[in-house]
Amino acid sequence: MNRLQISENFKLDEFIDPVTYEKFGARSVMFIRKEVILAAQYIRSTTGLSITVNNWANGGAYKESGLRNFNTSTGASYSAHKFGAAADLKISDLDSFEMGEIIKKNWQELYEIGVRRIENPEATKGKNRSWLHFDSYETQTKELIIVNP
């Protein structure tokens, strides 16, 4: 498989589900919003920490943490993931609360990139969350919106 580099630290397949990637290859970039890629790269560059979105291309288990195929049963029917507007970040050795703090600390810059909401880590407390959802769905405010799943 030819892996297309789309930012300093990320390849396209890290944001695309395998079904879509197999069908469209490099053209599947049209299905993921650029602000999702830019935000993940910003967090990676700012923290210096390794970030995983999808890792299926390397034999990993994550395949629906970026774009999700509309035929999947994972998540809500009209999830931001299905419109290429979301990613679930996994950052080495951090839980969802710690990742949320990184986003809050860098909120102004991330808002300028296009991040509008993060999932509330408190709403999933006790589920051993090692990932944090963010998306670029537009809102009516310029403040961080923390949504419950």
Image (cartoon, rainbow, N blue to C red):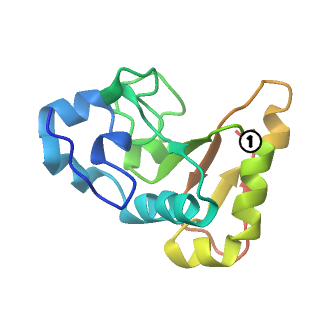
Using the image as rendered, state which of residue 105 and residue 112 is in the foreground: 105
Q: Is residue 106 visible?
A: yes
Relative to 16, residue 134 above or below: below
Question: In the rendered image, which quarter is residue 2 located in?
Answer: top left
Using the image as rendered, state which of residue 132 and residue 1 is in the foreground: 1
Name the spot of residue 81 as percent of width and height, x first: 46, 43
Q: Give the residue at x 46% y 27%.
A: 62
Q: Is residue 143 left or right of residue 13?
A: right
Question: In the rendered image, which quarter is residue 72 located in?
Answer: top left
Q: Give the residue at x 54% y 33%.
A: 76
Q: Give the residue at x 39% y 35%.
A: 68
Q: Which residue is mark 1?
A: 96
The N terminus: image quadrant: top left
Using the image as rendered, state which of residue 4 and residue 49 is in the foreground: 49
Name the spot of residue 20 as percent of width and height, x first: 23, 34
Using the image as rendered, state which of residue 121 and residue 76 is in the foreground: 121
Task: Count up the numbered dots.
Answer: 1
